Amino acid sequence: MLEGLLIGLETAFSFQNLLLVIAGCLIGTLIGMLPGLGPMSIIAIMIPVAISIGDPSAALILLAGVYYGAIFGGSTSSILINAPGVAGTVATSFDGYPMARQGKAGKALTIAAISSFAGGTIGALLLMGFAPALSSVALLFHSAEYFALMVVGLSAIATFAGSGKVAKALMMTVLGLLLSTVGESALFNAPRFTMGLQDLQSGFSFVTLAMALFALPEALYLVLDPSRGNNKEDGGAIKNLRITKSEAKKMVPVVSRQSIQGFLIGVMPGAGATIASFLGYAVERNIAKGDDQAEFGKGSVKGLAAPETANNAACTGSFVPLLTLGIPGSGTTAILLGALIALNVNPGPRLMVDNPSIFWSVIISMYIGNVVLLILNLPLIPYIAKLLTLPRNYLIPFILFFTMIGAYIGQNNATELLLLIGLGLGATVLRFADFPLPPLLIGFILGGMLEDNFARAVNISDSMAFMYERPMTLGLLVIGILLIVIPSLRRRKAK
């Protein structure tokens, strides 16, 4: 390991590779800030550039820098205009955007930057020490366990169900699951619920639905409520960027827990940053007490730090199955796997032995990349946060423009704009009726994976018995039930 680390340090700290890390982080951050252009899109675009470099280590360092740069920068649009263009930053908007509306946009971006840095850095250290051992743990997860893991993710609805909203949250989750069934599934080629529309053959786009649920209703709210568009900071100056001692004390235990939890979730193939961020938010919401718990969804420091730490730690963790098993943990790492194969590198258990410079230089570059991201982002926060000081008559077209562009680029299809408007108007009505919208998106994101893994597990076991015959599956299902039951019992006790 020490020999490998020395080789990795020598490779990662070469002048060319340092420049590639900086370039990747900068490109990823800028792209991540634009709703609709997530890490998958930009990595796919960057693959020809990476292959042209020739050196596999340098190519993977560049693509990895783009990957965690995009996740790092994805929080910006979620916090400032409530438009999460990347699934992994949806949970960031739950408390990040309310904090920005309270005139604390600068502080929200600072908390997000520091939490992302901490999660990514701790994740890189864990990856360095436990990658070989964790690769064998990842192999224990099969379709049954992934189905149970999706159930745990869906049980996070308890997090968003405030007093008297449990039924509404459940209804929104079911609606999200229904929307995820539109189009062809991985197991059945026949289109479902498309109403004869060819454009719905591949189902609803995540980007379109995310924009319709969060960004478009926000633009309509700005039209209907003029006072909502006014930034509460005096004279439009961005102040209050520093984190107080009390806020730092709240963040430390959250960052510590979610760095480890997020990394472990990222290690499991198929889980990724999205589930890590939702579960991170759910866990912190459920273990919080009193006023801390009531603050979630209204601008909580813990509610913002948890998903930002978890999703960056999970991004680092997703390199464990990719590098040690050759199994992509998400759509983005699947593209990275394709790039490795194009560069004649075969990831797997032998990679550390046969190509130590590639394995260890990528891990070292992750730590360097997190430092670079922090240095790039912290000085820019006052300028980025000034977006909210734009007058309302400029801010509304700005939000609408990026919403429309994000939806169109996602599928390159004008029908997406019609779907965006229809779903956006429906979401606005639901918001007026005080229905929580996050459970709908959680149901949609996890619905496809839930269905595929459930069908596969039933086919393998020929019955539903896998739910109680496999100890790990049963344990995860029990955790999922507890996530719903405990908050309900807590509310009854409070009454």
Image: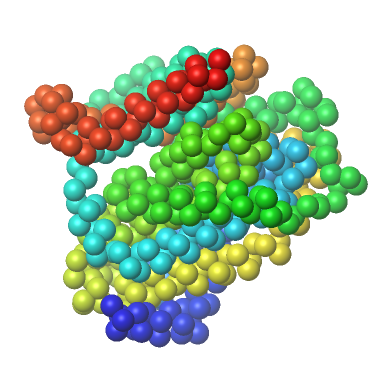
Direction from residue 131 to residue 432 in the image, left or right: right
Q: Quadrant of the N terminus?
A: bottom left
Q: Is the residue 216 above or below the residue 405 in the image? A: above
* Residue furthest out toward the right: 235
Residue 412 picture location, percent across and down: 49, 40
Q: Note whether residue 45 is visible.
A: no
Query: How many marks are shown on the rendered structure?
Result: 0
Quarter residue 354 falls in: bottom left
What residue is rendered at 57% in x and 69% in y? 372
Residue 200 picture location, percent across and down: 40, 27
What residue is rendered at 35% in x and 69% in y? 128
Q: Note whether residue 250 is visible.
A: yes
Quarter residue 389 falls in: top right
What residue is rendered at 34% in x and 74% in y? 360
> Which scheme is used to colour this image of the protein?
rainbow
Quarter residue 9 falls in: bottom left
Q: Is the residue 226 above or below the residue 115 in the image? A: above
Q: Is the residue 229 above or below the residue 66 in the image? A: above
Residue 146 picture location, percent across and down: 26, 38
Closer to the camera in the image, 396 or 140: 140
Closer to the camera in the image, 102 or 425: 102
Q: Quadrant of the C terminus?
A: top right
Residue 280 picture location, percent across and down: 46, 43
Direction from residue 101 to residue 84 in the image, left or right: left
What residue is rendered at 45% in x and 54% in y? 259
Direction from residue 276 to residue 136 in the image, left or right: left
